[in-house]
Image: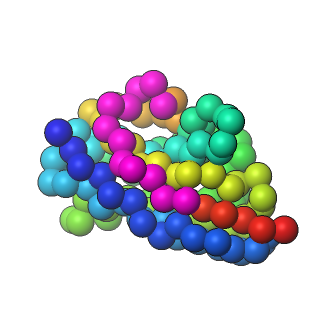
């Protein structure tokens, strides 16, 4: 089992920035691949970015150039730096983790078994 706790959400204006954090329980096996996903009301959960144990990152097209995913392996913590936020980024953001390698560590929510409770991001125009 892996416990994931997100923080850092909040309200910003268009063009603003937020940094999300996810603290993971000490389970290196099940946190080999970690990622950020989001879900807006009435929409399906969608991938934002993932990072694997080698530091390889993958981004959804909507996040490329604006968001940056990183991981502190010593703390087993995951981060998402979000810049140039737009109203379309407004959603509940979730941290996810699983034992995934290579092409399986990707922005596909179906690949992940462990999820946090989410942190809300609100962007006003």
Identity of the residue furthest to the right in this view = 125
Choose top left, top right, bottom left or bottom right for residue 105.
top left
Q: Position of residue 59 (x, y in %)?
A: 59, 44
Residue 76 part of the magenta-drawn span: no
Question: Is residue 17 visible in the rendered structure shown here?
Answer: yes
Q: Residue at x 59, y 37 (%)?
A: 46
**Residue located at (48% from left, 31% from top):** 109
Q: Quadrant of the C terminus?
A: bottom right
Q: Is residue 44 left or right of residue 7?
A: right
Image quarter hosting the N terminus: top left
Residue 40, above or below 113: below
Marker count (numbered): 0
Taking 87 as reference, is 51 above or below it? Answer: above
**Residue pushed farthest front?**
42
Q: How is the image coloured?
A: rainbow
Residue 60 pos. (x, y %): 64, 41
Q: Is residue 49 visible?
A: no
Is 61 or 54 nearer to us in this picture? 61
The residue positioned 78% from the left and 58% from the top of the image is 87
In this rendering, the answer to whether 88 lies above or below 58 is below
Which residues are drawn in magenta? Answer: 109-120
């Amino acid at each position: 089992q892996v416990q994931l706790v997100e923080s850092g959400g909040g309200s910003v204006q268009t063009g603003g920035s937020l940094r999300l954090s996810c603290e993971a329980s000490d389970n290196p096996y099940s946190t080999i691949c970690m990622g950020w996903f989001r879900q807006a009301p009435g929409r399906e959960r969608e991938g934002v970015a993932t990072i694997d144990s080698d530091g390889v990152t993958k981004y959804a097209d909507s996040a490329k150039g604006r968001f940056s995913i990183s991981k502190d392996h010593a703390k087993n913590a995951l981060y998402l730096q979000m810049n140039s936020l737009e109203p379309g980024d407004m959603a509940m953001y979730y941290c996810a983790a699983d034992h995934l390698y290579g092409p399986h560590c990707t922005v596909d929510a179906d690949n992940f078994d462990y999820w946090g409770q989410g942190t809300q991001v609100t962007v006003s125009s």
